[in-house]
């Protein structure tokens, strides 16, 4: 159960777009459409932003979008806003019926 | 309003035990699988364990090596995590969360802090 691979940090200016990658294997990301993304502000619980690769929960801005190609999933945030500054985690189900998270990406809005 | 309220965390000595609880309200608890996810200080999220809605099926992270046991009491709308033989590396905030069929969690508790130290 190795953690999914995410960049440790990304940054962007307000109004710009950024993409966070999440790389796994054919036993997790590549094998299932069960990739989800979570936003976590300091001292807070994670918040679901994307589920089943590209679906957005009610109430989540359409500036957030998700996709997947092969063993790599991606989260794109367009029109960056200062409140988007947070840690982001991807997650996937696995062939062992378990779950695995990525190591997390710190987004800095410059 | 959906609420997940964890309790039972605290300071425990290495080798000791703790039982965490997660009281659920605002949704049909028995209809959902549930998970425990932990986060060590300054570190990322780590999936710990999941349990099916009726409690019949459980899953654990390999790293736990049989030390933790997840359970639930649907009559009390409560999820549990029994943690034995605790180690310093088990120190973390422990979150409970629901699990939808697509393996995602829309509801999270606020977490309970477990500190393993002598």
Image: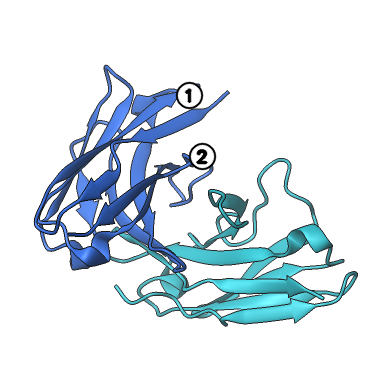
Chain colours: A cyan, B blue
Quadrant of the image containing the N terminus of chain B: top right
Q: Residue at x 20, y 67 (%)?
A: B63
- The answer to whether A22 appears left or right of B103 in the picture is right
Residue tagged 1: B27
Residue at screen point 35% across, 40% down:
B34
For the C terminus of chain B, the image quarter is bottom left
Name the residue rendered at 57%, 49% in the picture: A44
Q: Residues within 10 Å of mark 1 (few under 14, many from 20)?
A: few
| Left or right of residue A80: residue A35 | left
Indicate whether B67 appears above or below A80.
Answer: above
Is residue A95 among what the camera can see?
Answer: yes
Position in image of residue A102 (x %, y %): 47, 71
Relative depth, front residue between B110 and B75: B110
The image quadrant of residue A17 is: bottom right
Which residue is the site of mark 2?
B107
Depth order, front residue of A82/B8: B8
Quadrant of res B19: top left
Question: Of all residues shown, which one is farthest toward the front?
Answer: B118
Residue A56 in percent (x, y) is at 68, 51
Foreground of the two, B68 or B72 = B68
Name the chain letter of the residue that bears numbered label 1: B
Note whether A88 is above or below B17 in the view shown.
below
Label 2 element class: loop
In this rendering, does residue B61 appear at all?
A: no
On whether disc 2 and disc 1 are found on a single subunit, the reply is yes
Q: Are marks 2 and 1 in contact (CB under 8 Å)?
A: yes
């Amino acid at each position: 159960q190795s953690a999914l691979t995410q960049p440790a940090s990304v940054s962007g200016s307000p109004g710009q777009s950024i993409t966070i990658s999440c790389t796994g294997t054919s036993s997790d990301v590549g094998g299932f459409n069960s990739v989800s993304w979570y936003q976590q502000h300091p001292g807070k619980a994670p918040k679901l932003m994307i589920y089943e690769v590209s679906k957005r929960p009610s109430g989540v801005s359409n500036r957030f979008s998700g996709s997947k190609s092969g063993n790599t999933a991606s989260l794109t945030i367009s029109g960056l806003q200062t409140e988007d500054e947070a840690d982001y985690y991807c997650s996937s189900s696995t062939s062992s019926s378990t779950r695995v998270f990525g190591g997390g990406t710190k987004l800095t809005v410059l | 309003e959906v609420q997940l309220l964890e309790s039972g965390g605290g300071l425990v000595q290495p080798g000791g035990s703790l039982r965490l609880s997660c009281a659920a309200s605002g949704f049909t608890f028995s209809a959902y699988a549930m998970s425990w996810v932990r986060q060590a200080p300054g570190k990322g999220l780590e999936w710990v364990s999941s349990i099916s809605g009726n409690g019949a099926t459980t899953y654990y992270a390999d790293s736990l090596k049989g030390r933790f046991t997840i359970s639930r009491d649907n009559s009390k709308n409560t999820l549990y995590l029994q943690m034995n033989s605790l180690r310093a590396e088990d120190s973390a905030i422990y979150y409970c969360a629901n699990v939808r069929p697509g393996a995602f969690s829309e509801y999270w508790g606020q977490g309970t802090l477990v500190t393993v130290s002598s």
